[in-house]
Amino acid sequence: MDFDSVLPDVGAFGLYQKLVICFVLLPALIPCAFHAYSQLFIAARPEHWCRIPELATWENDANFSDFVKELSIPMEMRDGKMRFSKCEMFARNYSEIRELLTQNVPMSFVRNSVEGSNVSTISCKNGWNFDESVFKATVISEWNLVCDKDYYTTLALVLFGVGGLIGNYIFGYLQDSWGRRPSFYTYLMIEVVACALSAVAPNFVIWLALRVVVGLTVPAILASPYVLAIELVGPDKRSFCTLISNISYSIGLVLLSGVVYLVRSWRMLSLAVSVPLLVLLTCFPVLPESPRWLVAIGDYRRAAKIMRKIARVNKKTLPVNYEGVLRGKMEKAGTVTTIQKQLYGISDLFATKNMCKKTLIITFIWFANTSVYVGLSYYAPALGGDEIWNFFLAGAVELPTYFILWPSMHYFGRRWVLCVSMMIGGIACLATFLSQDDKATTLLLYCVGKMGISSAFVVLPLAASELYPTVVRGLGMSFSSVIGMIGPIVIPVINHMGSEMMVLPLLIMGALLTLGGFVSLLLPETMGQPLPQTIDDGEMVPIQKFCQCLSSTSSATSSTSTTKRKDKRMPQGALMFNETTI
């Protein structure tokens, strides 16, 4: 017997769960969206060109600014167009030019006086001027992280991703050791304090160190509310919680674009995306601990107390000695969990040829989805035009897909929805090669690509949890997600390559996503099929052959003996990872 069998005693999805999920847990996902992507604007790279101190008086004069730039900055081919250089200047006698401008000499005379000679170019000697029309100040403009230092921001995103990978391990252990409730507020305080302190960082190194600390907490801030949500409801509502959590996350992206629109200085923006989140601390008294986790560690007293509260709100009646009843029902579950934890490890994910293929396919698709989702979110500001508007669209276009996705998963199954979502997203990204001179069309294709990957990002964890056998489900989901998190470490480097060719990162991400879509067809359909409990059960559901990929139904239909298999319940630890790793 497992916890799902006793949850109906208090209501598997009653008023209590709905109130906690909608008004506490879903708002708790906003910090993840804020801190995962605010760095794109905190470290935004505005247009810049060499600073010429001698001509500073005229650089801000609307009548002279373009003229001064033409005299001092050479043109270069960039992204298929001639543009002013960002890192070079003409080696002219600017003191002489200043004297001419001071004497109000006509611009045509000044231009003729400096033209005709073969003037060489040199690197910027006196720093840079930065365009402040979009952002008043950023990390880039304050510390001149351009030209020979332009990789610094890419390095910051890479280390931010490394922090997330490390934090996934550290805070995962804390979540199991301390509980969901205290762990979440620990992550929240660390994240808020680190981000707020970064607002007063005196130099890039200290700022970078604090951003890595923020990165450590991002996966945990995403996972903790979600884990608690799915642990409070019955199995048939977990996919619903997955969908709602993604909607909340997308709303967080939209809200972030609004905050950025209002706050254009990086130091103030760092405070704006962190300090207001302290309001979530007011939810501490009403946020429950997971009774499922309490049962798993043997704290039946606290578990029974919380379940009485749930039952009271859900208008359910429990016996007076419910703690003893709960303890008696759950005794066997602890024994099974201990035995299974001792028997299975990562090697079992590759124990058989069939299991190995499933693990590799799921892990590759997970890597592709994570890489492209994060990559497209990171790349929105680089699409040209209004970067805040681009980011807003990147978050807003996700929302309609979820309402289409919900009925699609139940009607068409997991396999085809996953494949079509990835193919649509991949082809849209690849098509940007044909429209790279048309920014509006490129933006439209980008939005279609973002819709596709957002849809796939929801389907994959559900499909994977139904493919991994129960005895290694938690292990498999954790393994695939950790490998997937390598993507956010690599993707900033790919995006950095787009500084010379804007659509190059989109082409790379499109190819990766399209390949993942093809590979997903090798997976069997899992909709309506019983969950495999053991490795042997998993062997009865083989992967598809290429000749079967166009079949709309799985070639591996569970046999009568499969449906009558013994009810070997999922260990508690596996249950957590089954629904948490997105």
Image: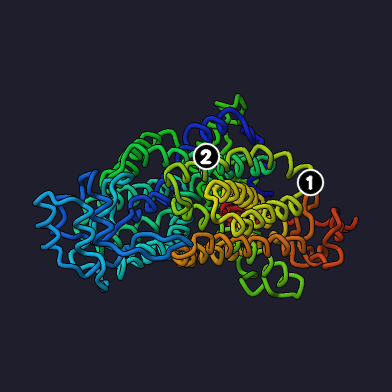
Q: Amino acid at mark 1?
A: Phe
Q: CA distance from mark 1 to mark 2?
A: 25 Å
Q: Amino acid at mark 2?
A: Ser
- On the picture, is 510 further left or further right than 107? right
Q: Is residue 506 at all visible to an observer of this figure?
A: yes
| Residue behind mark 1 | 412
Position of 124 relative to 293 (above/below): below
Q: Secondary structure at mark 1?
A: helix
- Give the percent coordinates (x, y) of residue 522: 77, 64
Name the residue: 81% across, 63% down.
541
> In the rendered image, which quarter is residue 230 located in?
top right
Q: Secondary structure at mark 2?
A: helix
Disc 1: CA contacts within 10 A as few (<14), some (14-19) or many (>=20)? some
Name the residue: 51% across, 66% down.
486
| Residue behind mark 2 | 248
- Give the percent coordinates (x, y) of residue 164: 44, 60
Position of 450 relative to 149 (above/below): above
